[in-house]
Image (cartoon, coloured by chain):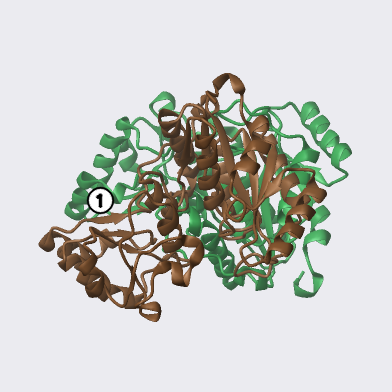
Chain colours: A green, B brown
Amino acid sequence: MSHGVIRYSSDTVVAVIDPDYAGKRVRDVLPYLESDAPVVASVDAGLAYHPTSLLVGIAPAGGALPEEFREAIRIGMRAGLEIVSGLHAMLGDDEEFAALAREHDSRIWDLRLPPAAPLFSGAAWDVTARIVLTVGSDAAVGKMTASLELTRAARDRGADAAFVATGQIGIAIAGWGTAIDRVVADFAPGAAEHLVLEGQRRARDLLFLEGQGGINNPAFAPVTLALMYGGAPDALVLVHNVARTVIEDYDVPILSYRALIRTYESLCATVKPAPVVGIALNTRECTDDEAREHIERARAETGLPCDDVVRNGPHALYDAIAPAIVKTSVLHA
Amino acid sequence: MSHGVIRYSSDTVVAVIDPDYAGKRVRDVLPYLESDAPVVASVDAGLAYHPTSLLVGIAPAGGALPEEFREAIRIGMRAGLEIVSGLHAMLGDDEEFAALAREHDSRIWDLRLPPAAPLFSGAAWDVTARIVLTVGSDAAVGKMTASLELTRAARDRGADAAFVATGQIGIAIAGWGTAIDRVVADFAPGAAEHLVLEGQRRARDLLFLEGQGGINNPAFAPVTLALMYGGAPDALVLVHNVARTVIEDYDVPILSYRALIRTYESLCATVKPAPVVGIALNTRECTDDEAREHIERARAETGLPCDDVVRNGPHALYDAIAPAIVKTSVLHA
């Protein structure tokens, strides 16, 4: 979570708290984040850099608050910082934190707190902006990053495009959105629909809808499907981390590119057809040669445009898939 | 909802409130329910039959409480009745009802109130009872009824079998279960898993897990998928109402039998394989000849056992599918 916010948020990260790396700068530890923010050992040390918010920068499975974070949050609240959390555990419902917030005029922003959502109505089918959903081989493979990078490329090419956040990290970055995984199951497609309707008010050409989970992740697939139907995509971008061979935390194999494409396309086709128009590979753990090989192999196996949008930038992939996703009549390029 | 409870609940329905049919008996209005309970015009009139509970016998899409039900509930609470509701709107959270419950020693049973659910863990894969999930062409086609009837047939044949309720009507009938559609999306598969673990404690041979929604119902499919993965079925029974041609409330076509079977089986196969072993058709609106024709056609198109378990009783279908779902080593028939 902290990586995503450091790299993509429009807010400035003034300091990162991590005792293991205190004294360094972010770019010394994680060069790809390109941030000069100092790493400090504690919230107290971080206060010297005049923050306005304290971000609980983790996203553990299950979303509980680790006990060791409580004291850091207390210190932040006493300093009057806004506390931003993407956990399932709502800090605003925690009696101690709620009392501290009142006492110190601190604010709690529970990113995952869902708005009241209606049932899916079908209104998403009338959105005129083209909706591109990232779908993955699993959770946490790079769908958010691909959506953010492609949004940037689309804007660079002159399109009126928006990133539509569906998870807590994306919401922290974009400043709006809904954590679909936190919505009551019956209303999850309605919440996704509500997001693309709001997206249409923010960008008239293209909406890059952040995907979640994976279609055969036994825990998270219902959220995936809520976005596939409720978000009413016109096109899909498949995202995979090449280092992943089984579904995270389960003994379930990752599907082949072709099986993934067939599964996603055939499900969408039963409600609103949406082809997979390209593949965004996450090759972070590869050498340049390995990355090139993975990208070539995915292209050969699927016949689709494929690239790593972080390693190589998003413009080449965007240019390759744009004809398939964009009705030029609504584009202002 | 009231139909299901009248037909299947182990509690006795002593009176039904419906001003349109007041003065008749249930069997005069709905012969198939085989109930002699009187139909009365109001809660006041119903009190003469010494009820202990008042059931809000509706299940509207969206699950809000219709305004015209409030006064009936007030009267029931003042009479000290337990109020049973399967709405999304939690009566226990309603300030007026909560106050009335305290004042009149009435109890509110919100059937859909979910327990705290964990993330899916994979423990369901170790359940030794065979799990049979009903999957449908859409919501409200007869999955609960098929599961209840097949449970009855399995018990008649000597199996230690349980019906596992996943929706508010099934819970009202069985007295336990979880409304999966009411669970936060991330935890819906975990809630389904919890149910089959509990089911295993209640029946060692066979669990008939009540399905929900339909795999291409744009609003309810995430709940369907949560049961397919979280419930870890060994076998599927496909349920269809032959009068249905489009998904209820949406302009989305119902899939063919073969497309439904392919879709359900191929998704399950990505996590834990579960074949469709039979088809339960709902032919309630058909003549005998039409019903026979529909059943024959489904058999011919799919090569699977098929029957209407209400019209013809569940034993023939159960006997036909039992070899495919039951490991005889764990059966005590």
Please report the residue visible at 23 percent of the width from the left and 50 percent of the height from the top.
A98
Q: Secondary structure at mark 1?
A: loop
- State the image coordinates of residue A287 (x, y, percent, origin top left): 74, 26
Front one among B244 and B13: B13
Front one among A324 and B130: B130
- The answer to whether one can see residue A149 in this image is no
Q: Residues within 10 Å of mark 1 (few under 14, many from 20)?
A: some
- State the image coordinates of residue B16 (x, y, percent, origin top left): 34, 68
Image quadrant where residue B245 sits: bottom right
Q: Number of marks in the image?
A: 1
Chain letter of the residue carrying label 1: A
- State the image coordinates of residue B100 (x, y, percent, origin top left): 16, 65
Quick check: B152 left or right of B217? left
Image quadrant where residue A198 sits: bottom right
- The answer to whether one can see residue A41 in this image is yes
The residue sitting at the left extreme is B103
Quick check: B272 left or right of A321? left
Front one among A139 and B241: B241
Quick check: A171 left or right of B17? right
Image quadrant where residue A21 sits: top left
Front one among A198 and B322: B322
Q: Identify the residue under disc 1.
A: A80
Quarter of the image for the N terminus of chain B: give it: bottom left
Q: Amino acid at mark 1?
A: Gly
Image position of A27 with respect to A135: above or below: above
Quarter of the image for the C terminus of chain B: give it: top right
- State the image coordinates of residue A205 (x, y, percent, origin top left): 69, 69
The residue sitting at the bottom extreme is B20
Image position of A46 with respect to A205: above or below: above
Please report the residue visible at 44 percent of the width from the left and 34 percent of the height from the top.
B199
